[in-house]
């Protein structure tokens, strides 16, 4: 009798363990804290769990799995299954998508940022480029045009940027360097301390990041319309992990991307941006708006030369650079 009960118990446990084995949990490496920038991933996690009845879930970590500049390396070795990173953090690791960080591309909405990003992500050269890291590009984290916040005297002309030490990465850093600024690259979480200590005098971010990382707290000025570009920050998955999903799990994941991005755009536009203007007013931060002649001069000095230099550099790396740049332009034209 006891043997029968024991056998029954083992069988029951076996079913339980088998049931548990069917559940899939992915570790997801983000950084900082939950904010507008991560709402696409948070929403994706919610949708995937709902669609699979809780059988496919995300364990989202904000800095506990990897440093943000090492997320792509972690994806390569399978340390986690999903991660977010920004192309400008390590352009040599992901040269194909740096086309999306060129200054003055003409991207003036989050919807357009999504369209051009997805077009580039799906190009065979980009797929191959990220494939070196066993990574599959899933979706962008679209950002509005960056602008600069700083301490001290506000710049009212392009000449006033000469010598300004500013945290700016990728094409934005190159653009500001053209007008004499001194760009430096550092992790977003390091920027507030660097500004407070005087290591830098300014930082280029999208509004959500100025709020999330505290650069707005002691700032004295903000450029409203410099709009040199934005950083491109994809969400990637480990390709082996993606291929190991069941058909239902893969459909739940890939079929939720558009909905997650739509939620993200709505959240950014109606939550983050709604708070930004009043916050600047509340803190008495001078809002610097440049006239069209100044902006035109900035674009002329930066856009063409930056694109030409990028194409030349990427051609040397064996990438179809002009094709990728033309893809961005044609997608925007559509």
Image: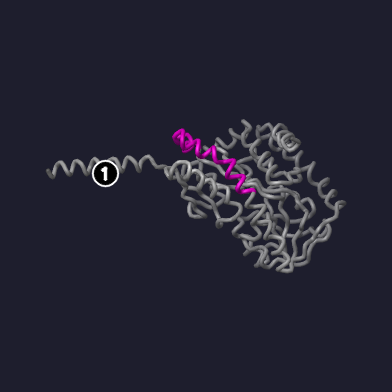
Tell me if 292 is positioned left or right of 76 in this view. right
Q: Most extreme residue toward the left, as rendered?
A: 1
If the image is split into quadrants, where does the N terminus sit?
top left
Q: Residue at x 47, y 34 (%)?
A: 243
**At 81% from the left edge and 47% from the top edge, which residue is drawn?**
299
Where residue 116 appears, as percent x and y from the top left, is: 68, 39
Regarding residue 327, the answer to whether it shows in the image is: yes
On screen, residue 47 versus residue 275, left or right, reads left
Q: Which residue is mark 1?
A: 13
Residue closer to the observer: 271 or 147: 271
Q: Secondary structure at mark 1?
A: helix
Rendered location of residue 132, percent (x, y): 55, 36
Q: At which x and y percent is residue 76?
A: 50, 41
Up/down of 165 relative to 234, above or below: below
The residue range painted magenta reads 239-265
Determine crowd level at label 1: few under 14, some 14-19, many 20+ residues with C-alpha closer than 10 A.
few
Which quarter of the rendering shows the C terminus?
Answer: top right
Question: Residue 316: where, in percent of width, then height?
Answer: 68, 34
Q: Is residue 167 visible?
A: no
State the image quarter where residue 35 is shown. Answer: bottom right
The image shows residue 52, relative to residue 220, as above or below, that is above
Q: Is residue 190 above or below residue 305?
A: below
């Amino acid at each position: 009798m006891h043997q029968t009960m024991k056998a029954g118990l083992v069988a029951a446990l076996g079913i339980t363990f088998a049931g548990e084995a069917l559940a899939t949990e992915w570790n997801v490496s983000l950084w900082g804290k939950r904010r507008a920038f991560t709402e696409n991933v948070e929403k994706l996690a919610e949708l995937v769990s709902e669609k699979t009845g809780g059988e496919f879930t995300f364990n989202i970590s904000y800095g506990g799995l990897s440093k943000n500049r090492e997320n792509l390396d972690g994806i390569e070795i399978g340390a986690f299954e999903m991660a977010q990173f920004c192309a400008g953090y390590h352009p040599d690791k992901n040269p194909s998508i740096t086309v999306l960080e060129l200054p003055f591309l003409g991207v003036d909405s989050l919807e357009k940022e999504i369209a051009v990003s997805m077009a580039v992500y799906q190009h065979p050269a980009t797929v191959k480029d990220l494939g070196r890291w066993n990574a599959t590009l899933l979706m962008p984290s679209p950002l509005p045009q960056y602008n600069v916040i700083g301490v001290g005297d506000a710049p009212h002309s392009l000449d006033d940027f000469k010598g300004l030490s500013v945290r700016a990465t990728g094409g934005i850093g190159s653009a500001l360097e053209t007008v004499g600024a001194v760009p430096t690259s550092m992790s977003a979480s390091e920027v507030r301390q660097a500004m407070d200590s005087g290591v830098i005098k300014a930082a280029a971010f999208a509004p959500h990041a100025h709020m999330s990382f505290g650069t707005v707290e002691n700032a004295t000025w903000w450029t409203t319309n410099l709009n040199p570009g934005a950083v491109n920050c994809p969400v990637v998955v480990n390709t082996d992990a993606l291929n190991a999903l069941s058909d239902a799990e893969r459909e739940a994941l890939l079929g939720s991307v558009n909905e997650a991005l739509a939620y993200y755009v709505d959240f950014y536009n109606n939550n983050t941006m709604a708070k930004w203007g009043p916050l600047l007013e509340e803190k008495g931060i001078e809002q610097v708006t440049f006239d069209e002649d100044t902006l035109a001069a900035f674009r002329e000095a930066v856009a063409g030369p930056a694109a030409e230099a990028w194409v030349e550099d990427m051609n040397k790396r064996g990438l179809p650079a002009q094709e990728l740049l033309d893809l961005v332009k044609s997608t925007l034209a559509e």
